[in-house]
Image: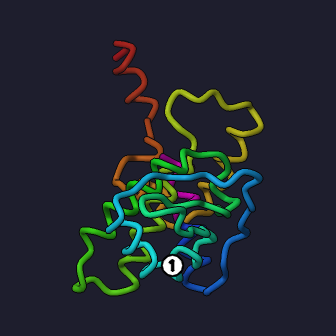
Amino acid sequence: AAHERIVYEALKTAAAAKEIPAAQGLLIPEVGDLPPEDVARRDDHKEMFATFGLSLEPFGPGAVAVRESPAILGTFDVAALIRQLADEIAEWGSADGLASRLDHVASTMACHGSVRSGRVLSQAEMNALLRQIETTPSAAQCNHGRPTFVSLTQRDLERLFERR
């Protein structure tokens, strides 16, 4: 949850400053299957995805090829991200403004590109994560509302171990 908040805030800051995050070219483009209508909708939002360093292009009538992804996301399930973004585009309609769309895309990308539960981190990775979350806005929870940390007093700990 902490890493997701860090990535989310970094993507939001880059988008607000109109600075495209460092994109990493994929040696072998990832291809995601989509219904043809989703591929067409994706073309309408090409510039928005480029804002985040995500380069998508049509790959036949029912697929999209990902040529570049934001370096900040590292390794992630590209096909799942493409499917989720396509579903969200279908739901947006014309009422939402660009700012809320950009925010939603940043949230989705941060979710897919962050450390997953159960992944073992090294001591250095844990320390780096703690140092980063200390300087991240809205650090108390991820963009879905889950807490990134909890504070326990001495008394709380004693109660947990039935010492008081």
**Neighbour tally class for label 1: few under 14, some 14-19, many 20 plus, Cα within 10 Å:** some
**Viewer-side residue, 154 vs 21:** 21
Residue plotted at (34% across, 53% down) = 145
Q: Quadrant of residue 36?
A: bottom left
Q: Is residue 31 located in the magenta-colored stretch of the structure?
A: no
- Residue 103 x %, y %: 42, 73
Residue designated by label 1:
46
Q: Is residue 1 left or right of residue 22?
A: left
Residue plotted at (43% across, 36% down) = 152
User: Magenta span: helix, strand or loop, mainly?
Assistant: helix
Per the rendered image, the range of residues in magenta is 1-8
When the figure is inspected, residue 159 is found, relative to residue 96, above or below; the finding is above
- Residue 85 x %, y %: 40, 62
Numbered circles on residues, count: 1
Question: Could you tell me which quadrant the C terminus lies in?
Answer: top left
Task: Work out which residue is located at the far top of the displayed protein and give it.
Answer: 162
Task: Work out which residue is located at the far front of the displayed protein and give it.
Answer: 61
Q: Is residue 101 left or right of residue 75?
A: left
**Viewer-side residue, 130 vs 59:** 59
**Viewer-side residue, 39 vs 49:** 39
Q: Residue flagged by tag 1: what amino acid is it?
A: Lys
Residue plotted at (43% across, 72% down) = 42
Q: Is residue 87 left or right of residue 57?
A: left
When the figure is inspected, residue 159 is found, relative to residue 72, above or below; the finding is above
Residue plotted at (66% across, 78% down) = 20
Q: Is residue 19 left or right of residue 142?
A: right
Secondary-structure class at tag 1: helix
